[in-house]
Image: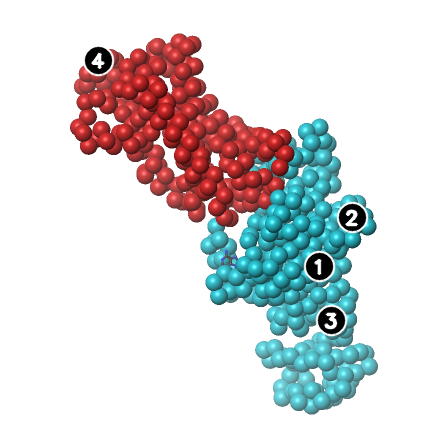
């Protein structure tokens, strides 16, 4: 296949994803405002009883940035089960594109949506006094970019196995919430009991949150290189599993 | 146009689901520029056959060549050569018709500069130019079907597959779509393979028809020849104590079938022979005479009525259930 055809194919899938995104303002709003809602409840409620050395609302902001990315990336990916349902997936799979091209196109599409939402949140963060500068915003976007690759892939993998959108609820209970709650988004990593520490280290979101806290607030448990290496390893494995899952996917 | 390779050559294709042979050793060849019909009742295996030809479903055994390419070893060439209009709608209704078509053009590597031009052309062909920027969810069923036919044409495929192009549409829309298919065939000379279980559809559009049932092709000929094989008139009788055996003995009687309280007799030349038939039949309460049509041909080959108005409910339920399971 010609390389230009591959690029056009990726663009095609991105184009569709983006058009749908623009049409679903309610989804965008809920994806941004749900984390903000949690953020203020937690920030003021729990913030009044804990001491993390710095303002608790600032402390958990990176976690909510990660939360937005986790929600929207995974759901965007898992949305492919909806394409199955409406038979649109047939139209895509019958096209002269390789499954790998289709996978990459879907990843790029899902990432775009997730990053736009994250960007809205960064703007809100600036308004409510999170210390964003041009430099740390670039770092933030970079970390989110790396993180979302693996997340969208994970969503796509799950979606490619799901049979019907009704099983969608499972995704949120068994993937989205554990990823979020074990990530240290809401609590510091250093003072945890040992078993809990192990669990948090199994969650890739932990490293994203730690990295974000590092670049935005200057506090972290691990070095940025460490965080990024784990996230990149997470991406690579999920891209590999994802292409495999897409190549075996039947209608 | 004088391409010696047939548009489609099916070499013993077979697809089994457990015990069930959905498509059973089909051999078939379709010439360039032909409009070919696959006619069969619900569950006959029509969609399964098309899905294999379109490389979306792996055959259990056998192979086929589409536009000269093997569906087993050259699937991406096959895909580039075909357009498919699926039985169920397969467009994204959150997008406009134009956006659905643009997406399609990109996936099929249509040159950037001709994308818009081609979209306008095919949308004009199906009379949807004025609605192209509306969301698909605002289209009627017939419009959506037309849009999907247009989409199938966009990359100028060598072969166009239409799976039940008019299923579930009202008679008026159906005739509209027939008109589009006819003009399409005339204007492009494209090979078209369509499946249907509407007799009139096959009769009106197709040059040749294969009757398929239980995954096997049980008759294959031009529509005219198929009808000639059973040429004659159909007499339906109702009455008490009809002399069936005596009727069987008459030289001009071709076929007798019993249907709840009635008998249906196919005879040669009713104008000449009806009188002798009625004399031999016994005590008659009701007589109907009509000339035979493709429906009788179908009944003859499959033992099943295919008429849309007399859909078999049980069969329908079976189909609905499999449709659900396949999701
Ligand atoms: N995924 C599947 N698993 C099991 N059986 C299947 C599957 N797909 C189709 N079948 C069976 O194969 C047979 C042929 O189905 P197919 O859909 O090809 O029929 P069809 O001729 O297109 O019917 P219709 O007119 O209802 O569209 C049916 O008996 C159906 O139940
Ligand atoms: Mg079918």
In red, which chain?
A: A
Asked if the residues shown at circle 2 and circle 4 are in contact, with their CB atoms under 8 angstroms apart, the answer is no
Residue for point 75% across, 53% down = B5
The disc label shown at residue B189, or none: 2
Of B271 and A52, nearer the camera is A52
Q: Which quarter of the picture shows residue B278?
A: bottom right
Q: Which of labels 4 and 3 is toward the front?
A: 4
* Cα gap from disc 1 to disc 3, whole angstroms: 28 Å
Is residue A24 rendered to the left or right of residue B91? left
Element under disc 4:
loop
Chain holding disc 3: B
What residue would you read off at disc 1?
A: B29
Chain holding disc 1: B
Q: Colour of chain B?
A: cyan
The crowd level at tag 2 (other Cα within 10 Å; few <14, some 14-19, many 20+) is: some
The crowd level at tag 3 (other Cα within 10 Å; few <14, some 14-19, many 20+) is: some
**Label 3 or label 2, whichever comes before in sequence order:** 2
Percent position of residue B12, x then y: 62, 62
Element under disc 1:
strand
Q: Which of labels 1 and 2 is toward the front?
A: 1
The disc label shown at residue A53, or none: 4
The crowd level at tag 1 (other Cα within 10 Å; few <14, some 14-19, many 20+) is: some
Chain holding disc 4: A
Q: Which quarter of the picture shows residue A136?
A: top left
* Cα gap from disc 4 to disc 3, whole angstroms: 92 Å
The disc label shown at residue B292, or none: 3
Q: Which quarter of the picture shows residue B238?
A: bottom right
Task: Say whether residue B179 is visible.
Answer: no
* Cα gap from disc 1 to disc 4, whole angstroms: 79 Å
Element under disc 2:
loop
Of B276 and A122, nearer the camera is A122
């Amino acid at each position: 296949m010609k390389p230009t055809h591959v690029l056009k194919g990726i663009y095609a899938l991105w184009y569709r994803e983006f058009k749908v995104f623009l049409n679903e303002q309610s989804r965008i709003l809920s994806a941004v405002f749900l984390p903000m809602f949690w953020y203020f409840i937690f920030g003021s409620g729990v913030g009044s009883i804990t001491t993390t050395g710095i303002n608790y609302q600032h402390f958990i902001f990176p976690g909510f940035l990660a939360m937005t990315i986790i929600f929207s990336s995974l759901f965007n990916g898992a949305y492919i089960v909806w394409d199955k349902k409406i038979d649109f997936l047939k139209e895509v799979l019958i096209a002269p594109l390789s499954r790998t091209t289709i996978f990459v196109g879907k990843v790029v599409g899902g990432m775009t949506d997730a990053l736009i939402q994250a960007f809205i949140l960064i703007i809100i963060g600036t308004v409510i006094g999170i210390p964003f500068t041009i430099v740390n915003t670039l770092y933030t976007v970079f970390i989110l970019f790396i993180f979302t690759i693996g997340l969208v892939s994970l969503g796509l993998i799950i979606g490619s196995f799901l049979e019907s959108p009704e099983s969608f609820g499972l995704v949120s209970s068994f993937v989205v919430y554990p990823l979020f709650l074990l990530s240290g988004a809401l609590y510091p990593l250093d003072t945890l009991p040992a078993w809990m520490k192990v669990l948090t280290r199994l969650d890739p979101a932990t490293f994203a949150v730690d990295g974000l806290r590092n670049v935005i607030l200057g506090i972290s448990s691990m070095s940025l290189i460490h965080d990024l290496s784990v996230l990149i390893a997470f991406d690579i494995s999920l891209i590999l599993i994802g292409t495999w899952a897409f190549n075996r996917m039947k209608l | 146009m004088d391409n010696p390779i047939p548009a489609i050559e099916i070499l013993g294709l077979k697809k089994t689901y457990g015990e069930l042979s959905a498509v059973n050793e089909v051999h078939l060849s379709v010439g360039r520029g032909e409009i070919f019909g696959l006619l069969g009742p619900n569950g006959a295996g029509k969609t399964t056959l098309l899905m294999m030809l379109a490389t979306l479903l792996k055959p259990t055994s056998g192979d086929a060549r589409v536009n000269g390419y093997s569906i087993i070893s050259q699937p991406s060439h096959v895909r580039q050569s075909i357009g498919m209009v699926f039985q169920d709608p397969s467009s994204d209704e959150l997008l406009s018709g134009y956006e659905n078509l643009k997406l399609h053009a990109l996936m099929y590597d249509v040159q950037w500069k001709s994308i818009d031009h081609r979209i306008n052309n095919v949308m004009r062909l199906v009379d949807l130019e004025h609605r192209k920027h509306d969301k698909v969810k605002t289209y009627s069923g017939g419009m959506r079907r037309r849009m999907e036919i247009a989409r199938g044409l966009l990359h100028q495929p060598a072969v166009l597959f239409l799976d039940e192009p008019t299923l579930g549409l009202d008679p008026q829309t159906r005739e509209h779509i027939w008109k589009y298919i006819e003009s399409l065939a005339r204007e492009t000379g494209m090979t078209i393979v369509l499946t249907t279980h509407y007799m009139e559809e096959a009769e009106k559009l197709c040059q040749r028809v294969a009757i398929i049932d239980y995954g096997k092709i049980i008759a294959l000929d031009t529509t005219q020849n198929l009808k000639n094989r059973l040429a004659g008139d159909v007499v339906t009788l109702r009455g008490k104590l009809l002399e069936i055996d005596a009727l069987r003995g008459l030289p001009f009687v071709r076929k007798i079938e019993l249907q709840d309280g009635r008998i249906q007799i196919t005879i040669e030349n009713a104008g000449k022979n009806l009188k002798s038939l009625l004399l031999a039949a016994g005590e008659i309460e009701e007589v109907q005479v009509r000339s035979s049509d493709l429906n009788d041909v179908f009944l003859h080959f499959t033992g099943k009525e295919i008429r849309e108005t007399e859909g078999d409910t049980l069969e329908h339920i079976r189909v609905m259930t499999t449709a659900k399971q396949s999701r």
